[in-house]
Image (spheres, rainbow, N blue to C red):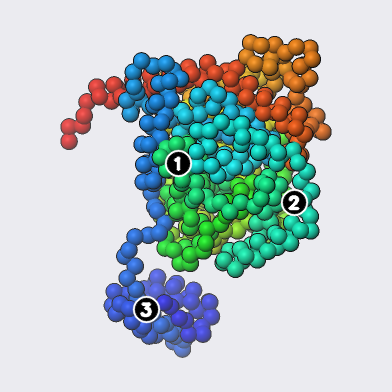
Amino acid sequence: MLKVNKKSNSLGKKLFKDTAAGCPGVLLKSLPEGKETKVVMPLTKNEHLKLQLKVNNCLGALNVRLGCDLCEAERDFLQKRKNVVAAALKKVLRLDHDLQGHEVPVVAVMATGGGVRAMSAFYGHLFALQKLNLLDCVTYITGASGSTWTMSNLYEDANWSQKNLVGLIHKARKCITRSKSSAFSMASLKHYDMKLQQRVQEGHSVSFTDLWSLIIDRMFHDELSDSKLSNQQQAVSVGQNPLPIYVALNVKENFQSSSEFQEWCEFSPYEVGFPKYGGFIPSEDFGSEFFMGRLMKKIPESKLCFLEGVWSNIFSLNLVDVWNAAQSSFPHWQLLNPEKEKDDNLDNNPCENQLSVHKITCFSPPSGFSNILNRVLTHRPIEESTPNFLRGLQLHKDYYKHEAFSAWPETKLDQCPNHLTPVEKELCLVDAGYFINTSSPPLLRKERNVDIILSFDYNLVETRFHSIEKTGRCCMEKRIPFPQIVLSEEDKKNPKECYVFMDKENPEVPIVLHFPLVDNSFREYKRSGIKRSPAEMEKGEMDFTNLKSPYRMTNLTYTEEDFDKLLNLCDYNVQNNSELVLQALRTAIERRKRCRKENQLRPTSSY
């Protein structure tokens, strides 16, 4: 406990400055434990500061888990899931022997965002994997934005992947195709108000994002759900389903765009945390108040619908984010940026350029008119704020030199200690699509040792390969194992249904099977090898390019026909390329066998 005797802030600052320079201070070890003690400290000849101190023993375990390794619960899940995956692989690959533990590859499904389009299409991709008996071969499923709506629906059932997905798809179809006007009715608005007041009474801070969360829940559920993220532990308790991981970005509220500063935050049924810092808390504690790694104020866990609003928080953008999004959608606009080529050529190694280069979209010095204009460009008028569970942690300025640390190119600014997230009172979490429309970062952590990534991309024509290409560039710049993404002009003009990216020389690089949202052979074939009759040709016609396309981002309601087309397209694309998936599984198993053999032959250290 610390009480200051009516002295100004400037005096407090002077105190710390003078004590740092050698003025008399107080040794905490000299104070009695558990008792209040009055201390008078001189500031100047005629000024002093009166403190009332109380020393408490805080040597117990921290409530924030510090470390880059996986939590014990996830490691336990991996052991259980490995048995399920091994049995599934033996069946699907028709092996005549059981796989040993070290031979079982880690397969992950990665879904991008894309609103209702992503929500609908993801059902189709997962349904295809189930039909091919491949769903039990998957260890992780990650999602961002719209694809998280599918995941949260699925994981309400603790055994969803063991049941036929037809029932769950029918339920989703009913919600997606109905009118959304009831979500904005007076009765719904009154209900939202009641829920938000209840949330305030529980101790949560309320923002527009919470209202958006309730609207999403009303639009895509028959009734408001009371499920929570920690409840999903039941769905992975015996390894019966893949482990779900949801992603969001932590950004700065002012002075910077999402492209200049962003940190990946991952949410699993077990933990929420920042792999960048190695700081994690139990999922049920997200939203509670922490300081210096300790839980200061416990607040009831938020319902899952409020997290869905965070993961698809499309309202926390600033004007610079709008411009960057426009450049992504219309690449030729980038020709208007004369600095782009210069920036692309910068060496982005944080260890070599730790404090030398800061890409900041603001004016220097930020004063007067330039400061006002910069605030206009970078202010987030409707931001989401969550108590920062990293607040007060004293991270060393060289934290990024830790062997497990991986930075994306735009994190240079954060290498300055005074810009570290632990100094912030609150987090500002937004949709991952503000930076890269991907949910892959949790899968690229070396602790998870992922062998195969099934990449389901729900971007439309203009940005069909934007996410995978940008992910590849970022990983290359930061030396994160990821295959080189090489696409020809023909690929971009006439894309295939599936691309296999891999590094044949480096087994640490995951094999990526990328499924863009395309309808090339689907137009003529209703199933692999079975052509459509003339009367069925209309069912293969997909409209992804028209401004009035039913699959545009702003459309929240599909017709039954449009939903079925998108579902069947994604189902078809996976089944039509099943042999590529099976070959990747065989390659991953052989890689693991070879690595085990090479490690056994490698001489051990002599010291």
Please state, as top left, top right, bottom left or bottom right, where the C terminus lies in the image.
Answer: top left
The residue that disc 1 covers is: 236
Q: Position of residue 74 (x, y in %)?
A: 40, 43
The residue that disc 3 covers is: 54
Classify residue 168 by image quadrant: top right
Residue in view at x 32 percent, y 74 percent: 28
The residue that disc 2 covers is: 183
**Is disc 1 surrounded by few (<14), some (14 to 19) or many (20+) residues within 10 Å?**
many
Classify residue 601 by image quadrant: top left
Q: Is residue 435 visible?
A: no
Q: Amino acid at mark 1?
A: Val
Residue in view at x 36 percent, y 15 percent: 96
Mark toward the start of the polypeptide (3 vs 2): 3
Between 310 and 161, the one lying in front of the other is 161
CB under 8 Å between discs 1 and 2: no
Considering only vertical position in the picture, is 42 above or below 510?
A: below
Compute the Cα span from label 1 to label 3.
45 Å
Between 572 and 483, the one lying in front of the other is 572
